[in-house]
Image (spheres, rainbow, N blue to C red):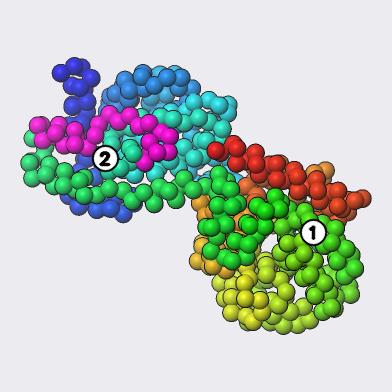
């Protein structure tokens, strides 16, 4: 037996003695019951063991070429990776776990250049899902990830899943090997070995778990996302976006019906949706609706009333389907605030009007100084999931949701020239809104309506937004 093997054996026994490897009945992260459980979080309390672990990992890393950076999978592998980094002088980056849902913070901390190769360090692999989540964010930041060095392979399918996702896994120990070492050392008996072997033979990880992780909407085409949308209007929008190669929604914030119809006709060929504030028209009459619907059908775009409902359910029901506007009869899409809870969504769902309808739920706002906070955002996303047959997407300013490709991210506040207006509106460029902010559809109002030639302006916005979307796909595939 060479030094390395001896060291590995001693290390395994130490893990058992500090209770980092336990036997009994335990539940894993993904809900499987297991007779053997590894809790490597404890290891930070044993600095000498940490040194041994880093030395063992470094032995493995020696055979992997061109490693520029290390990244430990949060949280357990963070200190492990730190120890390896200090000993090898390979710099580290850190992935923020919390930022992924809110999107407002940097996902990857540390200094790095796109194109650098980042080695993943992890403690225990069952399905490989934690590694894939980390890899997804690293790749999203332009880093190359092809290898992961891990302490323990539980031999439950993770290695194959990682392989299918382009990651080679190098493990210090396999579970069966660990069992042999512990049996030989008298830590466990034959019965336990048999129990664990039986468990490993019968329990393989469900691949759909990891499919969910790899399915980041920013990597997928609108065509494929149309199949994942549960809301009918979202499906239709995705199809239109793909067919017309446009992610442009024009905010038709004009004050007369003539201007509205003219604008719809002018920008129609370049848009997937026309967003109205029907209550700002000074001469609204129901005769507007027929011609507006005719234009939307002819140019194949969706009418979208930005009513931003925010009242108790009953009032929303009236506002949506009664009054002079009768929104539910002509606008397949409307916006709703989550502020008042679920009542508004129930009202939209239950009201009379068009059979197919969709809601964009507001999770963030482009207005400076708005009161929305992270908690509000998280609850809004939860509500959206609950109402996924009604909700077509989310209005937001950041890539808040990545793993629900059936939802559409709609970003208002887009202009090529301006950064702000004089009433607190904040703008992003078409490139930024798609490549950095995660927009699927960009809402452009005054950038087009106030342009000297709205037709040319809408063509330009359509082109820039579509090119950015194609760049985004190329970056991730
Ligand atoms: O491009 P603009 O600034 O001329 O127009 C932006 C449009 C307006 C706003 O009512 C709307 O986008 N908007 C929205 C929504 C829901 O569309 C949300 C938001 O946070 N900010 C915003 O400007 O019609």
Give the position of the C terminus as an image quadrant. Answer: top right
Q: Earlier in the sequence, mark 2 or mark 1?
A: 2
Q: Which of label 2 and label 1 is nearer to you?
A: 1
Asked whether disc 2 touches disc 1, contact meaning CB atoms under 8 Å apart, the reply is no
Q: Few, some or many C-alpha atoms within 10 Å of disc 1 (few <14, some 14-19, many ≥20)?
A: many
| Left or right: residue 55 compared with residue 477 | left
Question: Measured from the top left, where is residue 410 in percent x and y?
Answer: 66, 55
User: Which mark, residue 154?
Assistant: 2
| The quadrant where residue 346 appears | bottom right
User: Which mark, residue 268?
Assistant: 1
Q: Few, some or many C-alpha atoms within 10 Å of disc 2 (few <14, some 14-19, many ≥20)?
A: many
Q: Tally the marks.
A: 2
Which residue is rendered at x = 78% and y = 56% of the image? Answer: 269
Question: Measured from the top left, where is residue 460 in percent x and y?
Answer: 80, 45
- Which residue lies most toward the top here? 2
Give the position of the N terminus as an image quadrant. Answer: top left
The reply to whether the magenta stretch includes residue 452 is: no
| The quadrant where residue 323 appears | bottom right
Secondary element at image label 1? helix
| Left or right: residue 222 compared with residue 256 | left
Which residue is rendered at x = 75% and y = 56% of the image? Answer: 271
| Left or right: residue 124 compared with residue 364 | left
- Can residue 452 be seen? yes
User: Which mark, residue 247?
Assistant: none
Front residue of this view, candidates 391 and 182: 391
- Can residue 75 be seen? no
Which residue is rendered at x = 56% and y = 38% of the image? Answer: 476
Task: Using the image, determine if residue 100 lies above or below residue 62.
Answer: below
C-alpha gap between disc 2 and disc 1: 56 Å
| The quadrant where residue 200 appears | top left
- Magenta stretch, residue numbers: 161-185
């Amino acid at each position: 037996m060479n030094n390395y093997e001896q060291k590995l054996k001693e290390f395994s026994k130490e893990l058992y003695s500090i209770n980092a490897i336990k036997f009994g009945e335990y539940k894993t992260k993904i809900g499987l019951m297991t007779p053997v459980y590894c809790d490597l979080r404890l290891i930070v309390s044993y600095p000498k063991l940490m040194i041994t672990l880093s030395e063992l990992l470094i032995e493995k890393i020696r055979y992997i070429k061109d490693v520029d950076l290390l990244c430990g999978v949060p949280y357990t592998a963070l200190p492990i990776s730190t120890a390896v980094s200090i000993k090898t002088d390979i710099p580290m980056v850190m992935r923020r776990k919390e930022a992924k849902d809110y999107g407002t913070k940097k996902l990857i901390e540390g200094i790095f250049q796109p194109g650098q190769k980042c080695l993943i360090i992890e403690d225990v692999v069952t399905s490989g899902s934690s590694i894939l989540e980390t890899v997804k964010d690293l790749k999203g930041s332009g880093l190359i990830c092809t290898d992961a060095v891990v302490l323990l392979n539980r031999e439950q399918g993770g290695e194959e899943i990682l392989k299918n996702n382009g990651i080679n896994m190098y493990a210090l120990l396999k579970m069966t090997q660990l069992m042999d070492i512990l049996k030989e050392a008298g830590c466990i008996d034959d019965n336990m070995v048999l129990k664990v072997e039986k468990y490993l033979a019968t329990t393989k990880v469900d691949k759909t778990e990891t499919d969910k992780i790899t399915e980041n909407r920013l990597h997928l085409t609108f065509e494929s996302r149309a199949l994942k949308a549960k809301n009918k209007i979202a499906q239709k929008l995705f199809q239109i976006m793909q067919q017309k190669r446009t992610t442009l929604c024009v905010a038709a914030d004009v004050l007369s019906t003539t201007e509205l119809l003219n604008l719809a006709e002018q920008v129609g060929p370049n848009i997937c949706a026309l967003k109205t504030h029907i209550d700002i028209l000074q001469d609204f009459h129901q005769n507007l609706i027929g011609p507006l619907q005719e234009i939307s059908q002819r140019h194949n775009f969706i009418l979208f009333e930005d009513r931003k409902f925010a009242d108790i359910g009953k009032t929303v029901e009236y506002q949506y389907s009664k009054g002079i506007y009768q929104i539910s009869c002509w606008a397949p899409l409307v916006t709703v605030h989550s502020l008042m809870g679920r009542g508004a969504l129930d009202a939209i769902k239950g009201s009379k009007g068009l059979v197919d309808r969709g809601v964009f739920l507001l999770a963030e706002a482009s207005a400076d100084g708005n009161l929305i906070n992270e908690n509000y955002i998280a609850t809004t996303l939860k509500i959206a999931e609950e109402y996924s047959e009604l909700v077509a997407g989310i209005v937001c300013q950041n890539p808040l949701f990545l793993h629900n490709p059936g939802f559409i991210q709609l970003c208002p506040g887009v202009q090529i020239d301006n950064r702000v207006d004089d009433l607190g509106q904040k703008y992003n460029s078409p490139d930024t809104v798609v490549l950095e902010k995660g927009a699927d559809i960009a809402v452009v109002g005054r950038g087009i309506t106030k342009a000297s030639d709205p037709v040319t302006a809408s063509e330009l916005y359509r082109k820039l937004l579509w090119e950015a979307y194609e760049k985004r796909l190329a970056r991730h595939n």
